[in-house]
Amino acid sequence: MLVSFSVAPSGTGSDDGSVHNDGSVRDAVAAAVRIVRESGLPNHTDAMFTTIEGDWDSVFDVIKRATEAVGAYGSRVSLVLKADIRPGWSGELTAKLERLEAALEGQERPAPQI
């Protein structure tokens, strides 16, 4: 399965200077991404989401730990999840993009008009 998630703190931050005057949550996000990367699961982080590939238990354990880490930066945590559950498939973190790129390269006709 692939699970994309976004996690961010809100509310009162901690007293260690982790809340930035510019409204940034970069330190909180860095704490979450660090947990994802240390998990050893295939992952990708972009400007909006982090995507992890693995089985239910492994993926949701990492998301839980990442969410708990972000909780140290505020009194509340917002968590957004989107999952692609496809039993028997693996390597989809990159394979889906490879299939898309192949389709784009092979496309010779314009998209239909709506």
Image (spheres, grey):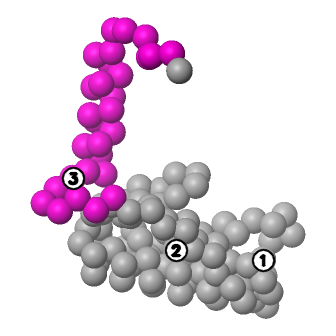
Q: Position of residue 49 (x, y in %)?
A: 52, 58
Mark seen at residue 91:
3
Kindly state the secondary structure of the residue where label 2 is placed: helix
Q: Which residue occupies 28% across, 75% down?
A: 56
Q: Position of residue 28 (x, y in %)?
A: 63, 75
Which range is magenta?
Answer: 84-113
Q: Image quadrant for the N terminus?
A: bottom left
- Nearer the camera: disc 3 or disc 2: 3
Q: Residue furthest left?
A: 88
Residue 12 in sight in this render? yes
Q: Residue tagged by mark 2?
A: 32
Residue situated in front as seen by the camera: 41 or 113: 113
Residue 18 in sight in this render? no
Q: Position of residue 88 (x, y in %)?
A: 13, 60
Q: Which residue occupies 41% across, 71% down?
A: 36
Kindly state the secondary structure of the residue where label 1 is placed: loop
Q: Amino acid at mark 2?
A: Ala
Q: CA distance from mark 1 to mark 2?
A: 15 Å
- Nearer the camera: disc 1 or disc 3: 3
- Compared across the picture, whether 27 is left or right of 53 comes to right
Q: CA distance from mark 1 to mark 3?
A: 37 Å
Q: Give whichever of discs 1 and 2 has the lower sequence position.
A: 1
Q: Give whichever of discs 1 and 3 has the lower sequence position.
A: 1
